[in-house]
Amino acid sequence: MKTERIIKQQARESMRGNMSVLIAAMGMVALSFLLLEYIEYLVLYFLKAVNFDTGEIIGDKKLIYYIVTAAATVLILFVSPLLNGFLRTAANAALHRKSKAVDVFCFFKSPKLYFKTVLYNFLLAVLFLTVSGALNINTYLETFAPDWYHQDPAWNTDTVLKVIAGVCTLFIKLVVYMVFVHYPLTAHALDENTSVKEGVFVMLAFSVKNFGKLFKLVLSFMGWFALCFFVVPAIYVIPYFSVAALTSANWLFKIDKRGGGI
């Protein structure tokens, strides 16, 4: 039996009796981020900083727009430990086959842990945005070939090239996430004592070493991810993948420790 099949089987077993908790934790995270996004749009609407018909920033309201979006970004960062809490919920299901709804708030239990988690998430976000931004094919096309990039979207060879560029950019972002973000987040979810230095920087060697294993696991879920196009299946798929990813990461961390690694 393939490793991925074993991991997925263990994940399904771990989810028994925990599915409602996992869905509730996921819903809490999603609603929190959606609420912040809604508040951002509401403020921009009342300040008339954006033309919501075209999506363009009003010329003399650019400063207001940037202030509001910056404030919203900071708020998202300070709420981000909820995401770590969801992963802890999945980790408890994976490791102990018992998770609780309050697990989603576990990184808020002390100021020290909370601000450490915020810093952890901030550094990971900066790494992801910096590396994925530097490798964004669409940005280069828009910068160096703006006339071609913004030309009539009629279906032709140029359109196909743009679609290919978009798919490649999306794939690159996925790879960057898998290398720089996935294992640090799972390490912090499995053990809140993981230091910022170890999780964000030292973990990189571990992430590169085990990239192939994670990539195979992601590939094994591609059919499930495709179903998320219909939105509703995501309610099952996201907890399923999260528990599987935590199960896999837990075994890999144990193997690495026995081998003298992280």
Image: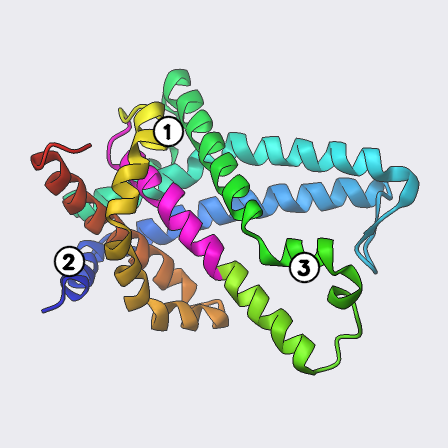
Estimate the spatial distance between the alpha carbons at disc 3 and disc 1, rounded to whole Å.
41 Å
In this view, the residue in front, 162 or 20, is 162
Most extreme residue toward the front, as rendered?
144
Residue 249: x and y, percent? 22, 46
Kind of element beneath mark 3? helix
Residue 126: x and y, percent? 52, 35
In the image, residue 100 sits, relative to residue 12, either above or below, namely above
Image position of 90 (left or right of 109): left
Q: Would residue 205 be visible to someone looking at this image?
A: yes
How packed is label 2: few (under 14 Cα within 10 Å), some, or many (20 or more)?
some
Q: Give the residues drawn in magenta, as a range.
A: 171-192
Q: Residue at x 30, y 41 (%)?
A: 186
In the rendered structure, find residue 35 and report the number of the disc placed on it.
Answer: none
Kind of element beneath mark 2? helix
In this view, the residue in front, 35 or 81, is 81
Kind of element beneath mark 1? helix
Estimate the spatial distance between the alpha carbons at disc 2 and disc 3, rounded to whole Å.
44 Å
Estimate the spatial distance between the alpha carbons at disc 1 and disc 2, rounded to whole Å.
26 Å
Image position of 157 (left or right of 234): right
In this view, the residue in front, 141 or 83, is 141
Q: Which amino acid does label 3 sit on?
A: Leu
**Is tag 1's residue or tag 2's residue first in the polypeptide sequence?**
2
Quarter of the image for residue 169 reads bottom right
In the rendered structure, find residue 10 and report the number of the disc placed on it.
Answer: 2
Q: Which residue is drawn at 54% across and 40% down?
A: 130
Residue receiving disc 3: 141
**Is tag 2's residue or tag 3's residue first in the polypeptide sequence?**
2
Verify CB contact (< 8 Å) between mark 3 and mark 1: no
Q: Which amino acid does label 1 sit on?
A: Phe
In the rendered structure, find residue 107 and report the number of the disc placed on it.
Answer: 1
**Is tag 3's residue or tag 1's residue first in the polypeptide sequence?**
1
Q: Which amino acid does label 2 sit on?
A: Gln
